[in-house]
């Protein structure tokens, strides 16, 4: 046991020296979760698990990528856009996945649109965001959410990607888009 414990100690030390390098960030649909609370059904983790669904996480992992979760609070407090990525804390993500998100704050959607304009990849699964959350959301805010979503996902040559069937399309879409991003960034001196 002492040899095993020393080995685990060394490995643990080495792993703490690195930085995570996940390319994918998975958005947590907190506003959809709050909207689905009902009597006796108010456990955020359970509701988020249902909303994200059983297919998104396995398809991301099977495509060869790891991911981190983020939400509106993290994006507002520490998120910033750089060329080809969203920086959240010490990590930079090239792909953001919106798993069946219906409600999304306007500030978040604006930041995601800026992320796409900077070269990041945005993928929505099962549905496209179309509702500004909260009872006090104005008709103008509702229209702005729908308009930004339309610009991102529905116009000809839309810059973001919509995946209707996660089990069939998500893994291949992520692999193709990230490979394409890698090819675009390889530059050789002339």
Image (tube, helix red, strand yellow):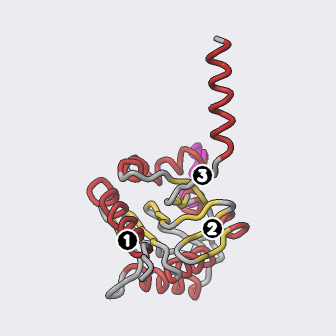
State which tag comes first along the sequence, 1 or 3. Answer: 3
- List x then y, in percent, for residue 112: 54, 75
Q: Residue at x 44, y 79 (%)?
A: 189
- Asked whether the residues under the numbered discs 1 and 3 touch, taking CB atoms below 8 Å apart as contact, a structural biologist would say no
In this rendering, is residue 158 above or below 77? Answer: below
Identify the residue position indicated by label 2 in the image: 87
State which tag comes first along the sequence, 3 or 2. Answer: 3
- List x then y, in percent, for residue 121: 45, 72
Image quadrant in which the C terminus is located = bottom left
Give the magenta part as a residue range. 34-43
Whole-Å distance between the Cαs marked 1 and 3? 22 Å
Could you tell me which secondary element the residue under label 1 belongs to?
helix
| Magenta span includes 36 | yes
Identify the residue position indicated by label 1 in the image: 183
In this rendering, is residue 147 above or below 33? Answer: below
Q: Residue at x 37, y 62 (%)?
A: 174
Could you tell me which secondary element the residue under label 2 belongs to?
strand
Residue 68: mark in rendering: none
Image side of residue 181 versus residue 44, left or right: left
Viewer-nearest residue: 182 or 106: 182
Identify the residue position indicated by label 3 in the image: 20
């Amino acid at each position: 046991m002492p040899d095993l414990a020393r080995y685990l100690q060394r490995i643990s030390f080495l792993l703490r020296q690195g930085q995570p390098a996940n390319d994918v960030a998975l958005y947590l649909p907190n506003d959809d979760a709050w909207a689905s609370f009902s009597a006796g059904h108010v456990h955020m983790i359970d509701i988020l698990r249902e909303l994200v669904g059983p297919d998104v996480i396995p398809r991301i992992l099977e495509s060869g990528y790891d991911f981190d979760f983020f939400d509106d609070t993290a994006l507002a407090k520490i998120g910033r856009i750089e060329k080809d990525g969203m920086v959240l804390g010490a990590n930079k993500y090239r792909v953001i996945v919106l798993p069946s998100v219906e409600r999304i704050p306007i500030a978040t959607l604006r930041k995601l649109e800026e992320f796409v304009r900077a070269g990041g990849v945005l993928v929505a699964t099962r549905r496209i965001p179309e509702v500004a959350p909260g009872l006090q959301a104005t008709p103008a805010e509702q229209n702005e959410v729908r308009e930004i979503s339309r610009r991102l996902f529905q116009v000809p040559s839309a810059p973001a990607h919509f995946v209707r069937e996660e089990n069939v399309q998500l893994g291949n879409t992520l692999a193709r888009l990230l490979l394409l991003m890698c090819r675009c960034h390889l530059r050789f001196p002339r």
